[in-house]
Image: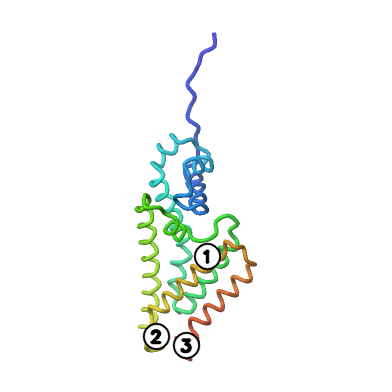
Amino acid sequence: MVRLTCGRPKSFDKEVALEKALDVFWTQGYDGASLKDLTKAMGINKPSMYATFGNKEQLYFQAVEMYKHREGAPFFTALEQPQIRDVIETIFSRTAEAKCSNEKNKGCLMIQSSLACSDDSHVVKTSALKMRAEFIQLIQHRFERAENDGQLVQGADIQVMTHYAVTMLDGLQIHSIDNPPPEMLESVAKIATEHLFQSCTPLSSS
C-alpha cells in the first residue's frame, strides 16, 4: 500500500529572492511590477512571498533597504574624502562606472519609484521623495563643510552647486538606460566636475 505524505515547502534563499525582487522593482518601477512578475523572478509562489516578506509594499521597502545598503556604501565613502572636488569627482565617476557595468539595472530606483507611481501608491512615492530629499541634503551639507574649510570661493552659491550636482547624477543614471559607450559617460562625468568647480574654488585648490 502506497502511503501519501505531505510535501515540504520548497526552501529558498531569502536574500537571493529579495535581490531578484529588487531587480524587478528597479527595471519596472513599483506600479509596473506585478505579483506575477515578482514571484516568477524570485522563484517562489505567492503564499511563500506573503509568509516571508509580507505584501507587495512591504516587499518593496525591504528591497529598498537592500538598495540603500548596496548603492549607498560607495557614496558615503566618497563623502568622507577631505577635498570637496575629490568627493564630487568620485561620486560622478563611480556613478558612470557602475551604470555602465550593470547590464540589468539602469537608471535610479528612487527616480523611477517617485515618477511612475499612481495615487494608490502614495506611500511608496512619498518614501522615495523623502529619500531623495535626504540625499540632496547630504550633498548640500558636504558643500557647506567645504565652504567652512575654505575650499570654495567666498559667496559660492551652495544651493545651486548642490542642485547642479544632483541634476548631473540624475542625468548620468537616466542616460545609462540608452546604453551609451562607457567612455562617453565617464567623459561627461569629468566635464561636469570641471564645470562645477571652474569658478567656485580658490586658485590654490584647483
97 lies left or right of 56? right
Disc with the residue nearer the chain's start (1 vs 2): 2
**Front-most of 33 and 2?**
33
Disc with the residue nearer the chain's start (3 vs 1): 1
The amino acid pointed to by label 3 is Ser
**Disc 1 packing (10 Å; few <14; some 14–19; many ≥20):** many
Assess whether mark 3 and mark 2 are in contact (beta carbons under 8 angstroms).
no
Task: Name the disc covering residue 199, or none.
Answer: 3
The amino acid pointed to by label 1 is Gln
Q: Residue at x 45, y 36 (%)?
A: 46
Q: Which residue is mark 2?
A: 156
Where is residue 93? Give x, y as percent: 55, 71
Q: State whether residue 16 is above or below residue 1.
A: below
Quadrant of res 84: bottom left
Distance of label 2 from label 3 (alpha carbons): 9 Å
Assess whether mark 1 and mark 3 are in contact (beta carbons under 8 angstroms).
no
The amino acid pointed to by label 2 is Ala
**Disc 2 packing (10 Å; few <14; some 14–19; many ≥20):** some
Quadrant of res 141: bottom left
Q: State whether residue 121 is above or below residue 71.
A: above
Q: State whether residue 27 is above or below residue 204.
A: above
Where is residue 131? Give x, y as percent: 38, 61
Task: Name the disc covering residue 173, or none.
Answer: 1
Q: Residue at x 47, y 41 (%)?
A: 35
Q: Residue at x 50, y 32 (%)?
A: 10
126 lies left or right of 25? left
Q: Secondary structure at mark 3?
A: loop
Where is residue 1? Give x, y as percent: 54, 8
**Disc 3 packing (10 Å; few <14; some 14–19; many ≥20):** few
Q: Secondary structure at mark 1?
A: helix
